[in-house]
């Protein structure tokens, strides 16, 4: 295996809750009140929708896609949701410092060094909103490719915190059978004083409609037993994925370098985009770099 290259789950498409608009010659992120599922191909008009988007939207209320049935491909919650504090170089769009609140990997003139990570509020390098949480959730939507994933990227505290809690809770409640549970992504909204009472949206993870926890756990046990009888080794899959993530100091790849424009919006846009929970930072990544919370 090539050292320094993060081996991440194969990505088949993207899940977003935002889009990019052009204002005064600048491409800026704008929140949505629904999900959009896209392919990884971008045209002049934006990201091309994945066929699953139309398929799921056909059964959605008022045509707005606010819940998506998903399956985790790993039992370990931290393999499904990758989250850390990230600081990007505005000029090169590459990560400069990535940390977890305890330790961080930082690029210096001497190479990559490990430092103490006090969190953005207490870090001198992170002052001015330069460092933000960055979450990447991998979920399976298409049973025809059971190891392929669709990725949801976000810099929202609410989405990251809620997803991390749900994954940990479901993992514990099911006895570690997270990958076998029937789950769905759900879009929720709330208003706060910081959002000037305007709704902000974040992503939650719940059991699918009509399924209670006891029934979901029983289904998970049956699926787990069937997999073992067929020779499927979930523990080995988690182990290999863990090794792949650990193969590089930074998991962020070239497709994500445009995140900078969404991390660091100009000051006249910050007031109107307070609590940027609804933005999927993948929106317009490459387009924003050439003209990318």
Image (cartoon, rainbow, N blue to C red):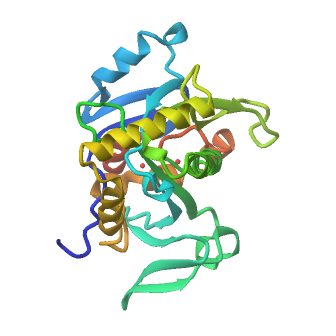
Write down the quadrant of residue 148 in the picture.
Answer: top left
**Furthest residue in direction left, as rendered:** 1
Name the residue at 29% across, 31% down: 143
Asked if one can make out residue 240 in the rendered structure from this viewpoint, the answer is yes
Q: Position of residue 205 (x, y in %)?
A: 57, 37
Write down the quadrant of residue 208 in the picture.
Answer: top right
Position of 6 compared to 116: left or right?
left
Above or below, 155 against 31 in this view is below
Name the residue at 53% across, 40% down: 279
Q: Position of residue 125 (x, y in %)?
A: 58, 76
Viewer-proximal residue, 55 or 212? Answer: 212
Above or below, 22 against 257 in this view is above
**Furthest residue in direction right, as rendered:** 193
Q: Position of residue 280 (x, y in %)?
A: 48, 41
Name the residue at 35% across, 16% down: 54
Q: Quadrant of the N terminus?
A: bottom left
Asked if one can make out residue 18 in the rendered structure from this viewpoint, the answer is no
Viewer-proximal residue, 208 or 155? Answer: 208
Q: Position of residue 117 (x, y in %)?
A: 59, 78
Position of 44 compared to 157: left or right?
left
Write down the quadrant of residue 42 in the picture.
Answer: top left
Name the residue at 52% across, 34% down: 218
Above or below, 214 against 231 in this view is above
Position of 21 compared to 142: left or right?
right
Above or below, 63 against 115 in this view is above
How many numbered circles does the render carry?
Answer: 0
Viewer-proximal residue, 236 or 194? Answer: 236
**Furthest residue in direction bottom, as rendered:** 110
């Amino acid at each position: 295996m090539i050292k320094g290259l993060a081996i991440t789950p194969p990505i088949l498409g993207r899940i977003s809750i935002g889009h990019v608009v052009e204002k005064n010659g600048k491409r800026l992120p704008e929140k949505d009140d629904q999900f959009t599922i896209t392919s990884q191909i971008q045209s002049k008009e934006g990201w091309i929708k994945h066929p699953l988007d139309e398929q799921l939207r056909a059964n959605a209320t008022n045509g707005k896609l606010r819940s998506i049935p998903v399956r985790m491909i790993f039992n370990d919650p931290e393999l499904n949701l990758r989250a850390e504090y990230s600081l990007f170089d505005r000029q090169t769009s590459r990560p400069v410092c990535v940390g977890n609140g305890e330790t961080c990997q930082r690029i210096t003139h001497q190479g990559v060094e490990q430092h103490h990570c006090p969190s953005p509020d207490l870090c001198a390098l992170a002052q001015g909103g330069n460092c933000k949480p960055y979450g990447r959730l991998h979920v399976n939507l298409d049973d025809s490719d059971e190891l392929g994933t669709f990725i949801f990227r976000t810099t929202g505290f609410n989405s990251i915190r809620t997803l991390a809690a749900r994954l940990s809770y479901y993992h514990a409640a099911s006895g570690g059978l997270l990958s076998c549970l029937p789950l769905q992504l759900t879009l929720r909204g709330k208003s706060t004083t910081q959002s000037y009472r305007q709704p902000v949206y974040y992503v939650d993870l719940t059991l699918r409609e009509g399924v209670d926890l006891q029934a979901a756990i029983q289904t998970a046990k049956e699926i787990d037993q069937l997999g073992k009888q067929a020779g499927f080794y979930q523990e080995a899959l988690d182990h290999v994925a863990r090794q792949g993530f650990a193969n590089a100091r930074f998991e962020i790849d070239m497709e994500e370098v445009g995140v900078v424009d969404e991390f660091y919006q100009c000051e006249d846009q910050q007031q109107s985009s307070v609590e940027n929970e609804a933005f999927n930072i993948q929106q317009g990544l490459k387009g924003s770099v050439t003209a990318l919370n």
